[in-house]
Image: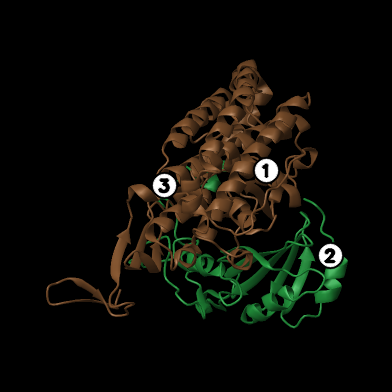
């Protein structure tokens, strides 16, 4: 910050000035309005932002380096901690990347089960984002309603895998157990009661004059700039481009489902809010279809060399013991090769670039983290806007510190 | 993966004689891989962006890989590009010697390359020439090494309970 000087009273003064003088404002690293550890050094002219300088890396945990020393099944818990608001999507994306590398085909049932879990995660993630936009505009009520509903999604995770936030759900090769009858009952109950409560939340904000005045036109980005910044997911769709990995490169049998991809027009906070609201409805449609048409069959693929067998069998069956030992000790030969696999994460294209040299761990693993890529557009999006709009822009972009810093 | 409208045969016919191209092939997973001359990366990307049949307008990802045993080509910068209209994905690689780890920056072509290049610089020490603000991004500024290079072992090197030798490799 070489362009800052102090006057004779020790007060900060900036050399480049607009209307006389600029103030320097530290937004973060820890600030209740940023929902995470984000630092922005803002130069403000009154309430207007002249420039912003983000600093990131406060929770960098060197995941890409860590992954180079971990066998494939041990990378899954790392992926939980990327976008922790929708951990199951990250887990599934990683499992599918490894399955693509080893050339394993999943039974249809596994695909449908994964779709249900991933779409629940998308709903949970979008609920957090949209209800927090409400909080940042001063409407706390919707947030308290929707966090109750998000708790129910976490209860559903708990039925599947025992965990709530960092789920570590599923295995390479499928799931560790089938959906329980309790899960199905809870899911049906959720599908029955959630839409009405969600629409109630929607009616609190969508056509609320105060909310609309606050968010329309806040933090806009044009589709050209969004593409240049490699935006993906809801933020790109809000700017008006209908790129969705689920449609363009269907994975996990997404081609079997009928759903719409909502797009916005202006790329502002209101459009991002609207796109996410509609995606929640579409996710519900997908879950209903998956539940109705759930194929029979096994909940895991028949790839004993890679699929960790159930623990009970390890104690009683010779084969299970052998495969368990081989997988845990990293004795299974993995083909060498390079794969890039992308899934539609809650924030956009979540990619895994995996290089295997045949060893027991990845030779190189790179995560394409949508948050990291689109957060760099933040200074451009808030330039010239009001400080309060900058807060809204950040929450509507849904920047998640874990995914940003990896 | 949905097949792209552009087959590899068509693609290689159009691009096989590009001056910046070293070689290209389609891998076992259906992805087109191109090795290009590192000094001409901007030209290559701009040519691909102007490709009439499938304009490659989306920089999906940018990262690097370290292969210490490849003498003279120890570092490799990997670009994942995507044509959203024809659904054509490309993996473009540029090899660099570790002693001269320099490559032109793509910031003038894609605004999103900025932080991706900063991250790659942070991890591998690759100098992106023409980058407007090449500083570390995830690690602290005082750090005096580039941690994803293979010579920096993740754990205590005296620890041998994860050594491949003990797993029959």
**Label 3 and label 2 in one chain:** no
Of badges 3 and 2, nearer the viewer stands 3
> Where is residue A365, by image quadrant?
bottom right
Q: Judge by depth and name the residue closer to the eye, B131 or A97.
A: B131
Q: Colour of chain A?
A: brown
Chain ID at mark 2: B
Reply above or below: A98 against A284: below
Q: Is residue A91 left or right of residue A146?
A: right
How crowded pointer 1 is (Cα within 10 Å; few <14, some 14-19, many 20+) is rated as many
Residue at (44, 65) in percent of width and height: B146
- The quadrant of the image that shows the N terminus of chain A is bottom left
Q: How many numbered tags mark residues here? A: 3
Q: Position of residue B1 (x, y in %)?
A: 77, 50
Chain ID at mark 1: A
Residue, disc 3: A136
Q: Distance of mark 3 from mark 2, alpha carbons?
A: 49 Å
Q: Position of residue A197 (x, y in %)?
A: 56, 29
Q: Distance of mark 1 from mark 2, alpha carbons?
A: 25 Å
Residue, disc 2: B8
Q: Position of residue B20 (x, y in %)?
A: 71, 80
Instruction: Tell me the SS state at disc 3.
Output: helix
> Where is residue A298, by image quadrant?
top right
Instruction: Tell me the SS state at disc 2.
Output: helix
Asked whether residue A225 is in view, the answer is: yes
Asked whether residue A356 is in view, the answer is: no
Residue, disc 1: A96
Q: Are marks 3 and 2 in contact (CB under 8 Å)?
A: no
Residue at (86, 63) in percent of width and height: B7
Residue, far left: A9
């Amino acid at each position: 910050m070489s362009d800052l000087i102090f006057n004779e009273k020790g007060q900060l003064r900036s050399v480049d000035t607009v209307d006389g003088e600029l103030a320097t404002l530290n937004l973060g690293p820890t600030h209740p309005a940023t929902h995470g550890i984000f630092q922005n050094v803002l130069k403000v002219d009154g309430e207007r932002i002249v420039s912003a300088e983000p600093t990131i890396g406060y929770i960098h945990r060197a995941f890409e380096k860590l992954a180079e020393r971990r066998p494939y099944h041990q990378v899954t818990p790392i992926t939980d901690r990327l976008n922790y608001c929708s951990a199951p999507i990250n887990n599934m994306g990683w499992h599918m990347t490894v399955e693509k590398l080893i050339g394993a085909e999943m039974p249809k049932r596994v695909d449908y089960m994964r779709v249900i879990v991933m779409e629940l995660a998308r709903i949970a993630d979008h609920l957090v984002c949209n209800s927090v936009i409400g909080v940042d505009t001063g409407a706390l009520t919707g947030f308290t309603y929707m966090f109750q509903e998000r708790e129910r999604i976490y209860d559903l995770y708990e039925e599947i895998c025992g965990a709530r936030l960092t789920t570590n759900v599923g295995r390479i090769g499928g799931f560790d157990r089938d959906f329980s009858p309790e899960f199905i009952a809870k899911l049906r109950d959720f599908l029955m009661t959630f839409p009405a409560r969600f629409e109630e939340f929607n009616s609190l904000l969508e056509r609320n004059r105060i909310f609309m005045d606050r968010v329309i036109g806040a933090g806009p980005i044009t589709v050209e700039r969004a593409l240049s910044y490699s935006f993906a997911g809801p933020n790109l769709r809000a700017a008006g481009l209908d790129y969705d990995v689920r449609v363009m490169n269907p994975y996990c049998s997404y081609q079997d489902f009928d759903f719409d991809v909502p797009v916005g027009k202006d790329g502002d906070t209101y459009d991002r809010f609207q796109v996410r609201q509609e995606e929640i409805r579409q996710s519900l449609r997908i879950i209903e279809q998956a539940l109705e048409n759930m194929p029979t069959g096994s909940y895991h693929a028949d790839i004993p060399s890679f699929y960790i067998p159930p623990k009970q069998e390890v104690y009683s069956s010779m084969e299970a013991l052998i495969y368990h030992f081989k997988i845990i000790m990293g004795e299974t030969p993995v083909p060498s090769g390079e794969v890039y696999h992308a899934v539609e994460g809650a924030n956009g294209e979540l990619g895994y670039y995996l290089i295997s040299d045949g060893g027991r761990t990845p030779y190189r693993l790179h995560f394409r983290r949508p948050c990291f890529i689109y957060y760099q557009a933040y200074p451009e999006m808030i330039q010239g806007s009001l400080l309060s709009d900058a807060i809204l822009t950040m929450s509507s972009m849904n920047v998640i510190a874990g995914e940003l810093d990896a | 993966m949905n097949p792209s409208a552009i087959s590899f045969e068509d693609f290689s016919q159009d691009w096989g004689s590009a001056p910046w191209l070293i070689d290209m092939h389609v891998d076992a997973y259906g992805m087109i891989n191109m090795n290009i001359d590192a000094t001409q990366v901007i030209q290559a990307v701009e040519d691909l962006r102007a490709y009439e049949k499938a304009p490659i307008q989306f920089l999906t990802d940018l990262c690097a890989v370290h292969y210490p045993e490849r003498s003279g080509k120890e570092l490799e910068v990997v670009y994942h590009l995507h044509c959203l209209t024809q659904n054509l994905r490309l993996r473009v690689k540029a090899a660099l010697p570790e002693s001269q780890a320099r490559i032109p920056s793509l910031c003038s072509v894609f605004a999103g390359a900025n932080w991706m290049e900063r991250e790659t610089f942070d991890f591998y020490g690759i100098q992106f020439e023409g980058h407007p603000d090449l500083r570390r991004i995830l690690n602290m500024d005082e750090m005096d090494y580039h941690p994803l290079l293979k010579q920096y072992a993740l754990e205590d090197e005296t620890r041998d309970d994860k050594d491949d030798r003990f797993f029959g490799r």
